[in-house]
Image (cartoon, rainbow, N blue to C red):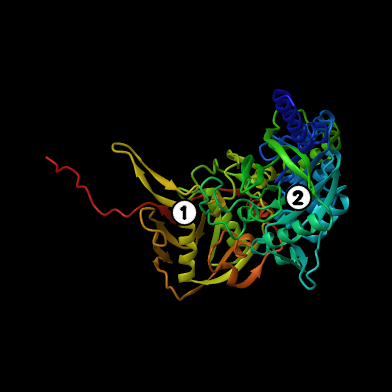
Amino acid sequence: MNSKLHTSSVGIIALVAVLAAAPAASQQQTVTILHTSDMHGSVLPWDDFRDRPADGSLAQVSTMAKAIRAEAGHPVLLLDSGDTIQGTPLEQFVHVRWSEPSPIIAAMNEAGYDAMAVGNHEFNFGLEVLDRARRQAGFPLLSANSVNAATGEPAFPTHAVFTAGEVRVGVIGLVTPNIPGWERPEHYRGLAFRPMSEVAAELAVHLREDEGCDLIVVLAHTGFERGLDDGTTSGTEYENFAWRLSRVPGIDLLLTGHTHENIPPRMLDGVIVSQPAARARFLTRIDLVLEPSDDGWRIASWDGWNLPTADAEPDPAITKETAAAHRRVAESLDGPVGRVEADLSVAGCRLHDCAPLDLIHAVQLDASGAELSLASLLTDRTPDLAAGPVTWRWVYAFYVYPNTLVKLQLTGRQIADVLEHSARYYRGVDCAPDGPCAVVTDADIPRYNVDTIEGMSYRIDPTRPEGQRVRDLRFDGRPVDPERRFTIVCNNYRAAGGGGFPHLAEAEVVWQSSEEMADLIGDYLARAGSWYPEINDNWRLGPAMTTERAAPAGP
């Protein structure tokens, strides 16, 4: 045999073998996954609190999703990771005042969602409202780790399986199990919450082995408890589990939420992870190319983006469907509550005592009759309020969560511990050589977890070590007796241990409100008729003066 011809023949045979082993392009399957999370009732691109346009909405997500489906030429799944039916006056009024179907669930039906994980805020209005949303949805609400407390049986569908071309896609829904740490017990009565990783591991095996799934997607209403690049802990392991979930064998995509971060799709320990921020400002798109393998289909390549939604036109079908309810909400929000006799702003409320924070304290003390009040400013998005009429629009912008009140008993020593926990936010003082000093704060601590106390006076020294920053704690002008018992009122989120504050979840409960704080604030202002925002300066921020510079001597 001619050696040259022989060599050429071997090359052809080898090439044929390689081509036979590699899947042809026609054998590959493409699947697109679209994902939102933490939409918090943002159906339309409108800020009800400020009464002006907003960036991002489900109506714009719908337009984008419909366009992607029309252009793709391959299967597209639209998924959500929860915290959906709470967060705007539109959803609040529908659930609490009118007992009507959810506008955002109706809009998700129009957009063509395939599945949604239940988030912790889905429980804010109680199980009756959540069940109404489940019945309304044209897609499953998944929560594999929410179980019947008595039987251990799943309380929601645990997963859904979709056929995307020849690929079987298993979708698991999970919710952060810290709901009892935030929520009123009657809102999740009869339920318990299993560890997320444990349930994910069980279902990943079940979907692979028993249901023949090729692709496992986890919709996880939880964030990352460690930095994605350096693995450093954020101290939020009690509510965030995504880092641990990424290590569960068998998961291909981990689509997260809860922490409102913008995390474009990336790899973490062999798993594609992402998060699309909050309020529908981004739509995550992940394009997966799958190829045949010995046991089904596997991911051959992928690409992904977090797509901004602000420039998309709102879906006219959703806009039309929501218009009447939106008008009703606007009319309700513009209703008068009372008057304020001086301008009001939330700017700087964590650097010094301020009138808006003192308003929360005054309402809590008035409603509860407690000796002390514990509260934080919930959002920096509250618009300034000029002297004059106050509307419900400002009240709901000011107090954005449907919290109720709880009165507890704590000792003076425990109250000091609570304040020290809050004071972790202040990490030091940075002074320019010839300029002003700035307080250094911890960006990893959510600002709504920076509480103050009304009814005592104190100073926070950010230059001291953690646990020693609260100084000069006094009640009625005298040092606080560590063993003296006080009644203290706070919101139900804090009373359940939300924010990791010590002692509160174990404290004796002596009273609870049934009314939500926004309504209590409105009632307080209405009864006052005309309210003057005074600041009592019961706390201040700054180190003690250890030296004194004498003024120059006179002539």
Q: Secondary structure at mark 1?
A: loop
Amino acid at dot 1: Asn
Residue 469 higher or lower than 531, as above or below? below
Give the residue at x 70% y 23%: 4
In-image side of 545 versus 204 (left or right): left
In-image side of 72 versus 192 (left or right): right
For the residues marked 2 and 1, what is the alpha-carbon distance in whole angstroms? 56 Å
The quadrant of the image that shows the C terminus is top left
Residue 54 higher or lower than 428, as above or below? above
Name which of mark 2 and mark 1 comes first in the sequence: 2
Q: Secondary structure at mark 2?
A: strand
Percent x, y for residue 417?
47, 66
Camera-near label (2 vs 1) is 2
For mark 1, what is the residue? 536
User: Which residue lies most toward the front here?
Assistant: 1
Amino acid at dot 2: Ile
The quadrant of the image that shows the N terminus is top right
Given residues 472 and 551, the one toward you in this image is 472
User: Which residue lies most toward the left here?
Assistant: 555
For mark 2, what is the residue? 216
Given residues 438 and 266, the one toward you in this image is 266
Percent x, y for residue 510?
62, 73
Percent x, y for residue 70?
84, 30
Quick check: can you spot residue 284? no
Percent x, y for residue 169?
81, 47
